[in-house]
Image (cartoon, grey):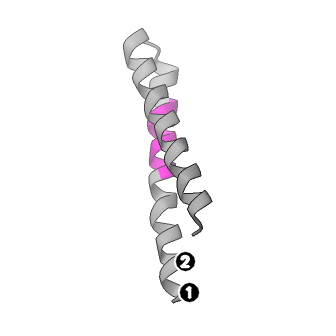
Amino acid sequence: MSLRWEIDNKVQALKRWARQRLGRATGNQRHQVAGKTDRAVGNLKQPGGKVQDASKH
C-alpha cells in the first residue's frame, strides 16, 4: 500500500470518527449509525492493505 493510500485511509477514518461524534453531540441517530458503520468498513480496509504490502516483499 502506498503512502498516499495510507494517508487517505487515515483521513477517512478521522472523518468517520468526527461524523459519529457529531451525531452523538447533536443526538442525530442517523449520523451516529452512519459514522459507526463507516468506521467499521474503514477498519476492515486497513489490514487488507498491510497484507498486500507483505505479499510484495
Mark 1 neighbour class, 10 Å CA radius: few under 14, some 14 to 19, many 20 or more: few
Q: Farthest residue in the top direction?
A: 26
* Residues rendered magenta in the picture: 34-42
Residue 32, horizontal then vertical, whole percent: 44, 25
Q: Quadrant of residue 56?
A: bottom right
> Which kind of residue does numbered mark 2 sit on?
Gln
Which mark, residue 33? none
What main secondary structure does the magenta stretch of the protein show? helix
In the picture, measured across the screen, residue 33 lies left or right of residue 5, that is left
- State whether residue 48 is above or below residue 36: below
What is the tally of numbered marks visible in this picture? 2
Residue 13, horizontal then vertical, whole percent: 48, 43
Is residue 44 found inside the magenta-colored segment of the image? no
Is residue 37 found inside the magenta-colored segment of the image? yes
Quarter of the image that includes the N terminus: bottom right
Q: Farthest residue in the bottom direction?
A: 57
Mark 2 neighbour class, 10 Å CA radius: few under 14, some 14 to 19, many 20 or more: few
Distance from Cα at disc 1 to Cα at disc 2: 7 Å
The structure residue drawn at horizontal position 53% and vertical position 68%, both measured from the top left corner, is 49
> Which kind of residue does numbered mark 1 sit on?
Lys
Q: Badges 1 and 2: C-beta atoms under 8 Å apart?
A: yes
- State whether residue 19 is above or below residue 5: above
Residue 15, horizontal then vertical, whole percent: 52, 34
In the picture, measured across the screen, residue 5 lies left or right of residue 51, that is right
Q: Which residue is mark 1?
A: 56
Mark 2 residue element: helix
Q: Which residue is mark 2?
A: 52
